[in-house]
Amino acid sequence: MEEHKKNESKSALEGNMTPPLGGGGARGGAERAYRVRALAKSRNALILAHYYTRPEIQEVADFIGDSLALARKAAETDAPVLVMCGVHFMAETCKLLSPNKIVLEPDPSAGCSLADSCNAKDLAQYKKEHPGYKVISYVNTTAAVKALSDCCVTSGNAVKVINSLPKDEKLIFGPDYNLGNYINSISGRQMLLWNGGCHVHEKFSVGAILALKKQYPDAIVMAHLECKAPVLALADVKGSTASMLTYAKAHPEQKQFIVATEAGILFELSKQCPKQEFIPVPPEVTEGENGIGASKAEGGIPASCACNECEFMKLNTLDKIISCLETLQPQVTIPEDVARDAVKPIEKMLNLS
């Protein structure tokens, strides 16, 4: 489980007073960060930040990581209040693993295109149409979808979990088509695949990767398993966001990396590996400026589009964290019957992985 603990000692924030917020700029940001940490201390709250959140969110977090790693780490602590800075399904997962804790989400409208691509009603109907099949759900799903699933997986353990299941077992995999397709390709299985996807990872440009490889011939290409097959075919390292960080740390001799995942990870990569260079892969575009000395038709990289970002992750802000810590709202709630069934496939995954 990959996560990074921070803020074990906040000597500058030992007092209980919270200064008034300043305006914009560095001073205003520092004052907001100070208030976040002071409020977290007064509430005995943990701040959890996904790798894809804004740098200033990661800076004030107690733990940084992928969604399930954060939820598991939080469940191991005595903190009664959790602030999940990510997207809604991540806050739900925190609540599933810490049902007796208050789980806050800074912005409930921070959804996920992948989770939204599969709703419980449609999945229930699909199960009826395919009797005898078991449902394997990516952890990037709502609690209601998990409740209809037999087992969950993450991008880090999906191959191991699927390979541990009987070879002749009939499986439905969802909602990420690209991850399921990758597992089918290396396992020889023929899982039925839900046609869902992450709007960020779907947009990576093969042409841009080829252009970057030409510009940085010695660079290692790292790609998330939510990327399409042509992108994964170009990658030297394929895996979860956390696995990219682990790989870079384990290979200090490698000085350059081309990174095909959401650009928020670049902040932690650069902090953990300051002597290495991380080059983001831009998204596919259909119009705009020519790329770094070349046209799009030639595989150029648009100068106006250097990073591929999730706008939902960026809805988390310091001001919203302050507000939810002050009011203890909005809180995540999950119906008891849904929570009871949704935690079972997570527990099965943990037993298998």
Image (cartoon, helix red, strand yellow):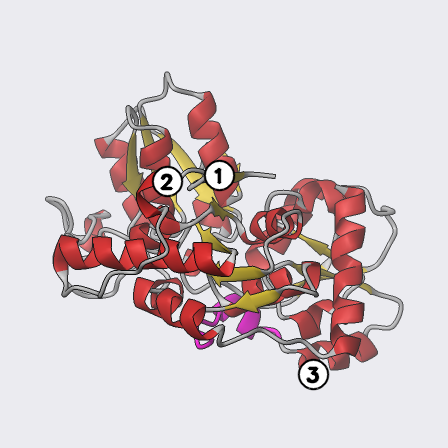
Residue that appears at 64% across and 64% down: 101
Q: Residue furthest top?
A: 253
Q: Earlier in the sequence, mark 3 or mark 1?
A: 1
Q: Secondary structure at mark 1?
A: strand
Q: Marks 1 and 2: in contact by CB < 8 Å?
A: yes
Quarter of image, res 131: bottom right
Q: Is residue 251 above or below residue 61?
A: above
Query: What separation in Å lies between label 3 and label 1 (alpha carbons)?
Result: 37 Å
Can you tell which of label 2 and label 1 is closer to the viewer? Answer: 1
Task: Tell me the kind of residue under disc 3.
Answer: Lys
Q: Write down the region rendered in magenta.
A: 107-118
Q: Is residue 328 above or below residue 24?
A: below
Q: Marks 3 and 2: in contact by CB < 8 Å?
A: no
Q: Nearer the viewer, residue 106 or 204?
A: 106
* 28 sits to left or right of 240: left
Residue that appears at 39% across and 65% down: 321
Q: Which residue is mark 2?
A: 268
Task: Tell me the kind of residue under disc 1.
Answer: His
Q: Residues within 10 Å of mark 3 (few under 14, many from 20)?
A: few
Q: Is residue 253 above or below residue 134?
A: above
Query: What separation in Å lies between label 2 and label 3 (alpha carbons)?
Result: 38 Å
Can you tell which of label 2 and label 3 is closer to the viewer? Answer: 2
Q: Which residue is mark 3?
A: 121
Query: What separation in Å lies between label 2 and label 1 (alpha carbons)?
Result: 9 Å
Q: Nearer the viewer, residue 137 or 173?
A: 137
Q: Which residue is mark 1?
A: 4
Q: Residues within 10 Å of mark 1 (few under 14, many from 20)?
A: some
On the image, the x and y values in percent for residue 154 come to 63, 50
Q: Nearer the viewer, residue 74 or 294?
A: 74
